[in-house]
Image (cartoon, rainbow, N blue to C red):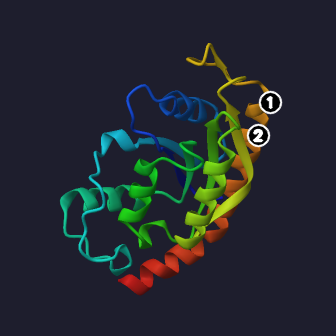
């Protein structure tokens, strides 16, 4: 398998969030031959509410923050999205970040690590619908963490051991799919040149 890069995107930016600890756990435990994993914290990008005049699909980004985000997303062959569930969906910060760019997401693989009172299942399902529209192939294996059983006193992240097996299965699926989609990404790049 050729070298692949997978971005672990932490989708919450609010103060006191649990997502950064989850993202760091994913990075510490995600392993696959020929695959590099890198943490991408949305809080580091301070994206405003979508402020591009033209639709992302046109690829004509006017603002420096959009171009920086587009370049960052374009670096990866796939993603692991770490998302909480807020009000039965994903956080606005993640939806906003997804909406900023278009072609940079295409023909890549992704997995979802969600968390919340019910394991973040509704955020997970909503995110899958968005990923399909962005031409991101999401894998079957999920990792769903409960704030009741995977945190001590709702504050210290202490995931159950079974989640390590789930994460490894997800990583294996992402690596396989990201590798399989690589020729399509190469074709997209040659058409854009």
**Quadrant the N terminus occupies:** bottom right
Badge 1 marks a residue whose secondary structure is helix
Please provide percent x and percent y for residue 38. 48, 42
Q: Name the residue under label 2.
A: 166
Image marks 1 and 2: residues in contact by CB distance under 8 Å:
yes
User: Distance from label 1 to label 2 (Cα)?
Assistant: 7 Å
Please provide percent x and percent y for residue 53. 23, 73
In which image quadrant can residue 4 be found? bottom right
Please provide percent x and percent y for residue 141. 75, 50
- Whether residue 138 can be seen here: yes
Local crowd size for mark 1, using a 10 Å CA cut-off: few (<14), some (14–19), many (≥20): few
What's the residue at 27%, 77% (across, down)? Answer: 54
Q: Which residue lies furthest to the front in this view?
A: 87
Badge 2 marks a residue whose secondary structure is helix
What's the residue at 68%, 63% (across, down)? Answer: 177
95, above or below 8, in the image: below
Please provide percent x and percent y for residue 55. 33, 76
Q: Name the residue under label 1.
A: 162
In which image quadrant can residue 57 be found? bottom left
- Whether residue 75 can be seen here: no
What's the residue at 58%, 42% (across, down)? Answer: 85
Question: In the image, is 160 to the left or to the right of 127?
Answer: right
Question: In the image, is 86 to the left or to the right of 181?
Answer: left
């Amino acid at each position: 398998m050729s070298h692949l890069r997978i971005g672990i995107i932490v989708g919450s930016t609010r103060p006191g969030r649990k997502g950064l600890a989850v993202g760091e756990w994913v990075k510490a435990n995600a392993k696959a031959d020929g695959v590099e994993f890198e943490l991408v914290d949305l809080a580091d990008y301070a994206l405003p509410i979508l402020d591009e005049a033209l639709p992302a699909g046109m690829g004509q980004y006017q603002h420096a923050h959009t171009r920086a985000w587009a370049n960052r997303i374009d670096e990866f062959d796939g993603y692991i999205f770490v998302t909480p569930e807020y009000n039965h969906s994903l956080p606005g910060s993640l939806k906003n970040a997804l909406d900023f760019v278009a072609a940079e997401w295409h023909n890549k693989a992704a997995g979802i690590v969600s968390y919340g009172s019910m394991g973040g299942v509704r955020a997970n399902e909503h995110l899958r619908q968005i990923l399909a529209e962005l031409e991101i192939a999401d894998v079957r294996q999920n990792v769903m963490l409960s704030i009741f059983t995977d945190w001590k006193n709702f504050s210290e992240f202490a995931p159950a051991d079974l989640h390590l097996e789930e994460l490894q299965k997800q990583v294996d699926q992402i690596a396989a799919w990201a590798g399989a989609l690589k020729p399509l990404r190469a074709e997209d790049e040659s058409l854009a040149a």
